[in-house]
Image (cartoon, rainbow, N blue to C red):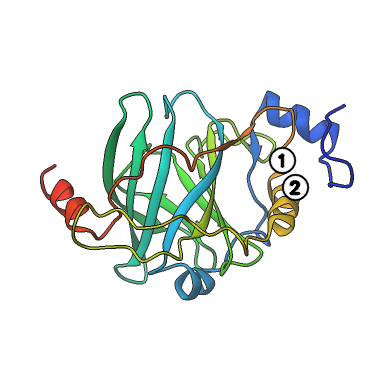
């Protein structure tokens, strides 16, 4: 039997076994953010990644930390994702813009067109009970081989808004520490269990890993970021 802190909701033993044997659940339609909510609450905000839950070995090797993201709307079909992160294995920064295309008329479900770890079968799902507070961005890299409603090669990241000012000049790194005082951890835990059949923090695989560590890289929109992107 899986264990967790007393008083915290737990997933079933069956969900734990299926997550280990097959992969994380594809979120149900009522878990996925609407396209209107994505446009109104996500586009244009500055995000950082706090945790990821990785259930893939084929598409991502090594650990990435100190991730910054910003989403912008190119038109009513295509969004742009600007991403900066640190690659642990090489201790270097990566600056990666990418495009995603809507594949659902009502929900925030996307197909990657370019950018980081693109595969022809990748499907992305945006999940939240309160998009003004947090997002789960779930990447399913094997969208063509979903079995029993589960993704065999996936990555689920927890994003929160970065309330610091993102600079344009200088080294492109925000000043000060991030503020996590208003993060609704209880809602996040309940969303993980209801939508992914996954305990947020427990002793079973796949595990949630804290990723806000190490040295920050220049944020999207900064001169450093833009020059690096132009040079690629």
Q: Quadrant of the N terminus?
A: top right
Of all residues shown, which one is farthest toward the front? 176
Against 231, residue 142 (above or below) is above
Against 26, residue 14 (above or below) is above
Q: How many numbered dots are placed on residues in this image?
A: 2
Q: Which mark is residue 193?
A: 2
How many C-alpha atoms fall within 10 Å of the one at disc 1: few (<14), some, or many (≥20)? many
x and y percent of residue 214 in the render? 41, 37
Q: Quadrant of residue 33?
A: bottom right
Q: Earlier in the sequence, mark 2 or mark 1?
A: 2
Query: Disc 2 and disc 1: Cα gap in Å?
Result: 5 Å
Numbered disc 2: secondary structure: helix
**Which residue was labeled with disc 1?**
198
x and y percent of residue 226 in the render? 17, 54
Of all residues shown, which one is farthest toward the left? 231
Q: Pick the residue in front: 126 or 184.
A: 184
x and y percent of residue 105 in the render? 50, 67
x and y percent of residue 124 in the render? 49, 49
Q: Which mark is residue 176?
A: none
Q: Quadrant of the C terminus?
A: top left
Position of 140 with respect to 220 (left or right) is right
Numbered disc 1: secondary structure: loop
Q: Pick the residue in front: 6 or 231.
A: 6
Which residue is rendered at x = 68% and y = 61% of the image? Answer: 184
Which residue is rendered at x = 55% and y = 43% of the image? Answer: 51
Label 1 near label 2: C-beta < 8 Å? yes
How many C-alpha atoms fall within 10 Å of the one at disc 2: few (<14), some, or many (≥20)? some
Q: Pick the residue in front: 224 or 21.
A: 224
Against 19, residue 137 (above or below) is below
């Amino acid at each position: 039997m899986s264990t967790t802190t007393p008083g915290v909701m737990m997933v079933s033993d069956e969900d734990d076994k299926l997550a280990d044997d097959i992969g994380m659940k594809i979120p149900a339609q009522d878990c996925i953010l609407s396209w209107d909510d994505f446009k109104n609450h996500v586009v244009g905000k500055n995000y950082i990644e706090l945790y990821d839950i990785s259930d893939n070995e084929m598409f991502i090797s090594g650990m990435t930390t100190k991730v910054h993201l910003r989403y912008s709307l190119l038109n009513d079909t295509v969004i742009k994702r600007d991403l900066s992160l640190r690659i642990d294995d090489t201790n270097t920064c990566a600056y990666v813009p990418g495009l995603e295309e809507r594949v659902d008329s009502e929900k925030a479900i996307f197909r990657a067109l370019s950018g980081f770890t693109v595969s022809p079968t990748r499907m992305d799902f945006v999940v939240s009970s309160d998009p003004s507070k947090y997002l789960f961005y779930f990447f399913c890299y094997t969208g063509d081989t979903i079995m029993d409603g589960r993704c065999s090669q996936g990555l689920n990241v927890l994003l929160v808004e970065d309330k610091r000012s993102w600079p344009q000049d200088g080294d492109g790194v925000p000043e000060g520490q991030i503020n996590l005082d208003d993060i609704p951890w209880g809602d996040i835990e309940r969303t993980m269990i209801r939508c992914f059949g996954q305990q947020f923090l427990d002793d079973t695989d796949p595990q949630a890993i804290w990723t806000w560590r190490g040295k920050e890289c220049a944020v999207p929109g900064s001169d450093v970021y833009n020059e690096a992107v132009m040079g690629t």
